[in-house]
Image (tube, helix red, strand yellow):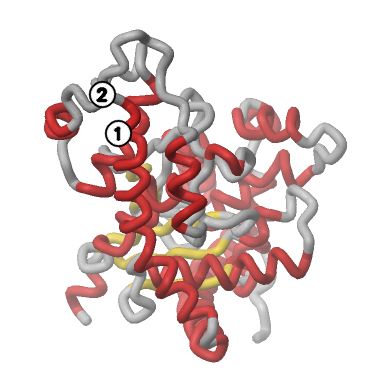
């Protein structure tokens, strides 16, 4: 228990607004399981964040449970990691409101994702879409997290979280630990199969490979993957001039453990016709045990309920201590219960 107390804290969450895909797995979830021995890890289904876009209620509930099952199937042992659903820990929403009052309008207006999502949801540019980085800051600061594993696209939000924590601490003393972004060197950015210049996204299902997808569908997507229009048609890593092939090489390297040089030698003279199916087959075999284990877990609803209940109880215990301290600092009367 003494060693457990000395562990650094790591926290992350993914919105259950769609099925988990290969980019989520290679860029984040794959690496999470291995960190449990080194860090005290908290991973959650960020269901409150999904509400900035209109959701089908039944689908959101289904995806939240499926995401939990996929987390476990990807190697997140509930005995070693705290797994929970964000909305089950009400301290997230409470601290989110308080941090809204310590986040500047100009800071929120500069968030790149707000601009992107506003363009995509022009008929629903709501207040939550604008202020959700404050809720994201609350997610992190509640647990006094040391590290937040994020992709490059989330680094801006992590920096804002640091700014909010420093601002609050400067006013009230040492309340929040200032977190650091934890960005893995390999597999951190998987691009779309249909558009290798854009990150793989569930918003482009034809260029996105989902963890629960059928093998034949995965194989078809890789056969149709965009490569390059150059005449040499060789498998060579050159992100600037050959983004499609380079993306496939990155994926192949991530699922096989081979280096880029080894991949170039393996497919020397073979061309794209042999390379693309090989990448697809490697991905299929990587995802097969995950899909099968997730399906098994989804059939055991009682077990999943036990996991998210125990996870929320542990998360709430930690979050409550931070929120109680914040309430006292800002002058709120202590709760009687």
User: Depth check: 251 or 98 in front?
Assistant: 251
Say which quarter of the image contains residue 302. Answer: bottom right
Residue 235 image label: 2
- What kind of element bears circle 2? loop
Q: CA distance from mark 2 to mark 1?
A: 8 Å
Residue under circle 1?
Answer: 275
Q: Residue furthest top?
A: 231
User: Depth check: 119 or 192 in front?
Assistant: 192
Height in image: 92 above or below 224? below
Residue 288 x, y percent position in the rendering: 37, 63
Q: Is residue 170 visible?
A: no
User: Depth check: 328 or 96 in front?
Assistant: 96
Q: Is residue 212 visible?
A: yes
Q: Residue furthest bottom?
A: 302
Left or right: 165 as drawn, with respect to 259: right
Left or right: 17 as drawn, with respect to 282: right
Residue at 64% of width from left, 55% of height from top? 17
Q: Are marks 2 and 1 in contact (CB under 8 Å)?
A: yes
Height in image: 290 above or below 270? below
Q: Quadrant of the C terminus?
A: bottom right
Residue at 67% of width from left, 63% of height from top? 94
Q: Sort mark 2 into few (<14), some (14-19) or many (20+) by Cα contacts within 10 Å.
A: many
Residue at 50% of width from left, 59% of height from top? 214
Q: Residue furthest right?
A: 123
Residue 89 x, y percent position in the rendering: 60, 72
């Amino acid at each position: 228990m003494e060693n457990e107390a000395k562990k650094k804290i790591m926290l992350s969450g993914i919105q259950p607004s769609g099925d988990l895909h290969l980019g989520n797995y290679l860029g984040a979830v794959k690496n999470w399981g291995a960190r449990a021995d080194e860090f005290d890890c908290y991973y959650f289904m960020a269901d409150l964040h999904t509400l900035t876009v209109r959701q089908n209620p039944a689908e959101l509930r289904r995806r939240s449970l499926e995401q939990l099952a996929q987390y476990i199937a990807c190697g997140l042992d509930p005995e070693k990691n705290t797994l929970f659903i964000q909305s089950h820990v009400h301290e997230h929403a409470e601290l989110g409101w308080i941090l809204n009052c310590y986040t500047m309008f100009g800071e929120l207006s500069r968030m790149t994702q707000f601009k992107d999502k506003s363009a995509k949801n022009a008929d629903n540019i709501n207040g939550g879409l604008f202020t959700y980085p404050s809720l994201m800051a609350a997610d992190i600061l509640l647990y006094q997290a040391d590290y937040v594993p994020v992709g490059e696209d989330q680094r801006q939000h992590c920096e804002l979280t640091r700014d909010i924590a420093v601002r609050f601490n400067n006013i009230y003393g040492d309340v929040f630990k200032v977190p650091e972004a934890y960005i893995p060197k390999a597999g951190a950015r998987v691009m779309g199969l249909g558009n290798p210049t854009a990150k793989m996204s569930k918003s482009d299902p034809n260029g996105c490979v989902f963890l629960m997808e059928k093998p034949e569908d995965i194989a078809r997507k890789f056969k149709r993957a965009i490569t390059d229009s150059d005449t040499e048609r060789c498998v060579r890593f050159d992100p600037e001039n050959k983004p499609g092939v380079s993306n496939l090489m990155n994926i192949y390297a991530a699922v096989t453990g081979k280096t880029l040089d080894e991949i170039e030698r393996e497919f020397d003279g073979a061309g794209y016709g042999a390379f693309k199916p090989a990448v697809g087959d490697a991905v299929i075999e990587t995802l097969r045990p995950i899909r099968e284990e997730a399906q098994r877990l989804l059939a055991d609803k009682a077990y999943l309920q036990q996991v998210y209940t125990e996870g929320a109880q542990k998360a709430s215990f930690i979050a409550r201590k931070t929120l109680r301290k914040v309430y006292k600092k800002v002058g709120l009367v202590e709760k009687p219960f």
